[in-house]
Every structure is written in C-alpha cells, then in structure tokens.
C-alpha cells in the first residue's frame, strides 16, 4: 500500500514536471527473489531506463542464490539487459535522510536518502535514492515480543524447532509450521509452497493428537492410536515474475523450464489455480488480467509522453 502511494506521488510529480523527476533513482537492498522481481517490475512501472535508474545491492556473491540454476541465469540476464546496476558482495553500512536536498521537496512527501555501502574488501561508497526498498529481511531483536516471548525452543534465527511431524520439540501437543518454524537442520525455504504443504499435515496431526488423547481418557473407547504423519516436502518448482510480460519457471526437478511471455501467462494461471477456492481463483485471474492491461496502457502512455527523437531531414 505504501509503495503504491509513493509511486502515485512520483507519477503526479513527474506529470507536473517537478524538478529532478526526469530520472527517478531507485535502490533495492537484497538480491533474493523479492529484490530481483521488484527491480525489474519497478523499472518497467517507472517507464524504463530512460526515466528511472535501479540499483540492486546484494551482500552475497550472486543474486538469486537460492533459486534454481535456470531461474538464476534468466533473472541475471534480464537484470543485465534491463540496465539494472547490480552490486554484489556489498553491504549497507548506514542510511541517512537528505533533508535539505532540493530534489527531496520535488520528489514527493518523503526525503531522499543516501546509502553508505561497503564491499567485502572494505571499500566504501555512497549512493542516493528517491525510493529505497529493503528486501533483505530483518533479524528480530530478542525483545520478548510476539513469538520471541514464547517458551518454545527456538533456533538462532528465532524459528520454532520441530521434528518431521511438525510437532514442537519436547512438546506433545504444540505444532508449528510456515516461516516461523524449522522442521529440519537445513531449513526448508520460507515460501508459501512449503507452508501450504505443511498445513494439511499439521491439521491431521492436531486431529490425531486430540483423538488419541480422548481415546486415552475414555477407558471403554478403542485403544488404537491414530498415527501422526511426517512432513515430506514435494518441490513443485519455482516461478518468478520478471516484468509485466516476462517470467521464468522451473518445475519437475528441472525437467520443465520456460521463460518469457509464455511463462508469464502460465505463472498467472498457476497462481489462479492454486487459490484455495474456485471463487478466489477466478478473482485472482481477473485481477491479474486487469492489472496487466492497466500496466500496458500506462506503459503506452509513458511512451507517448516521452520526448520524440528529432529527425534531421536535411
Ligand atoms: C514480497 C514477498 C513475496 C513472496 N513471494 C513468494 C512467492 O512468489 N512464492 C512463495 O511460495 N512464497 C513467496 N513469499 C513467501 C510467502 O509469503 C511466505 O513463505 C508464506 O506467506 C508463509 O506463510 P506463513 O503462514 O508461515 O506466514 P504468513 O503468511 O506471514 O502468515 C502469518 C500470519 O500471522 C499473523 N500474525 C503474526 N503474529 C501474530 C500474532 N502474534 N497474533 C496473531 N496473528 C499473528 C500475521 O499477521 C500473518 O497474517 C513471498 C514473501 C514476500 C514477503
């Protein structure tokens, strides 16, 4: 919501011809799925490299380090082709608002900022941004709030430790799933795909635990115990959006690979099909189609507004 608000402020300022708005500077911290998807989609949304510059800062040595090889290659190629500056092995040291920058007042209702960076070798530099987006995650401080207040055993990143039954370690009747849990030593990816596959397993295991408890309490009832199910992850593949008409998909353990416009349509269809109810599926399909049409017409509008190349007839 906040990003949408800021983008519409930038649109208004540009339409009014505000100072410094001829080239919007966007800096994205974090070169994971979210950072790369944002970089390519924002560049497109803001009119392309003539009217926008996007810099992607990543601490690791390559972006999309957890993606499949195919998606990483396609993503990296698209970043290069779009002219997005990617700085790997680089960390953010400090961020400061530039209150008295003349572009700040023209840039919207928030100050521009400078981002101090340091490479792995300790080389420091600074860049400025009209729009700064942080996709590098956050380590929760151990302030005793939320899940950190719980007595459940947690790992160094605050995730609740479970076994393969997704039952919390040292507990008989507490289960944990999704991003906040860790079911094995090498954690599953923090994705919706994992959380959605874990959900029916946890639902069954809660049911089985309750049945077993009831049967244990009622002496006359059956003593057969209901078996709890282990969680087995089935990697269905991964999809990434790389722009309005571009995406990359891998599936079936790498047997299926697709990128470009066809992948973009397939990605939208898969999202719609994966919605929990048919009604949500139809809504998702309709919304994504209308969003696509809106973005296309906005892009056409941007193209019309951009100054035409002057042709020298003589
Ligand atoms: C920008 C972005 C893009 C992503 N894209 C993808 C993608 O393309 N594919 C994919 O598979 N995954 C994607 N993910 C990851 C995916 O969203 C998560 O892995 C998934 O939502 C995890 O599900 P969850 O149920 O564990 O947590 P969540 O979906 O975060 O749900 C937790 C819920 O608990 C609520 N909550 C928190 N604390 C409390 C409390 N104390 N009391 C009550 N309620 C509370 C929260 O408000 C929230 O609604 C993306 C994530 C982000 C941020």
Image: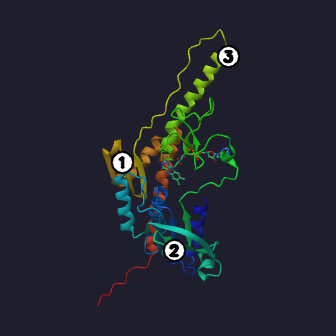
Distance, label 2 to label 1, CA atoms, is: 33 Å
What is the x, y in percent for residue 204?
55, 28
Residue at the spot of label 3: 217
In the displayed structure, 57 sits above or below 256; it is below
Residue at the spot of label 2: 24
Dot 2 or dot 1, earlier in sequence: 2
> Which residue is at the front of the view, 103 or 68?
68
Taking the spot 41% from the left edge, 50% from the top edge, the residue there is 239
What is the x, y in percent for residue 248?
37, 53
Q: Classify residue 296 as left or right of residue 18.
A: left
Q: Give the crowd class for mark 1: few <14, some 14-19, many >=20 residues within 10 Å.
A: many
Residue at the spot of label 1: 250
Label pair 2/3, CB-CB below 8 angstroms: no
Instruction: Please tell me whether mark 1 or mark 3 is closer to you in this view.
Output: 3
Distance, label 2 to label 3, CA atoms, is: 67 Å
In the displayed structure, 194 sits above or below 311; it is above
Taking the spot 43% from the left edge, 44% from the top edge, the residue there is 270
Per the image, label 2 sits on a secondary structure element best described as strand
> Which residue is at the front of the view, 35 or 38?
35
- Disc marking residue 185: none
Taking the spot 55% from the left edge, 45% from the top edge, the residue there is 179
Q: Quadrant of the C terminus?
A: bottom left
């Amino acid at each position: 919501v906040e990003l949408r608000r800021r983008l519409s402020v930038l649109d208004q300022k540009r339409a009014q011809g505000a100072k410094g708005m001829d080239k919007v500077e966007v800096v994205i911290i974090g070169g994971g799925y979210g950072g790369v998807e944002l970089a390519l989609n924002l560049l497109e949304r803001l009119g392309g490299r003539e009217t926008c510059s996007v810099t992607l800062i990543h601490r690791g040595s390559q972006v999309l380090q957890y993606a499949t090889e195919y998606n990483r290659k396609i993503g990296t190629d698209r970043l290069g082709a779009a002219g997005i500056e990617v700085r790997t092995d680089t960390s953010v040291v400090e961020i400061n608002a530039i209150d008295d920058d003349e572009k700040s007042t023209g840039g919207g209702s928030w100050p521009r900022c400078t981002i101090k960076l340091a490479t792995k070798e300790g080389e420091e530099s600074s860049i400025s941004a009209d729009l700064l987006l942080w996709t590098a995650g956050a380590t929760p401080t151990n302030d005793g709030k939320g899940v950190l207040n719980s007595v459940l055993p947690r790992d160094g990143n605050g995730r609740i430790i479970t076994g393969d039954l997704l039952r919390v370690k040292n507990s008989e009747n507490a289960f944990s799933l999704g991003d906040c849990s860790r079911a094995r030593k090498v954690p599953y990816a923090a994705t919706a795909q994992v959380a959605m596959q874990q959900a029916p397993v946890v639902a069954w295991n809660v049911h089985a635990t309750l049945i077993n408890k009831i049967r244990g309490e009622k002496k006359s009832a059956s003593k057969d115990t209901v078996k709890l199910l282990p969680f087995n992850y089935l990697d269905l593949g991964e999809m990434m959006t790389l722009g309005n008409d571009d995406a990359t998909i891998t599936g079936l353990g790498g047997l299926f690979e697709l990128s470009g416009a066809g992948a973009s349509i397939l990605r939208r269809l898969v999202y719609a099909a994966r919605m929990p109810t048919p009604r949500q599926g139809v809504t998702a399909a309709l919304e994504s189609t209308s969003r696509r049409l809106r973005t296309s017409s906005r892009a056409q509008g941007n193209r019309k507004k951009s100054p035409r190349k002057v042709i020298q007839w003589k």
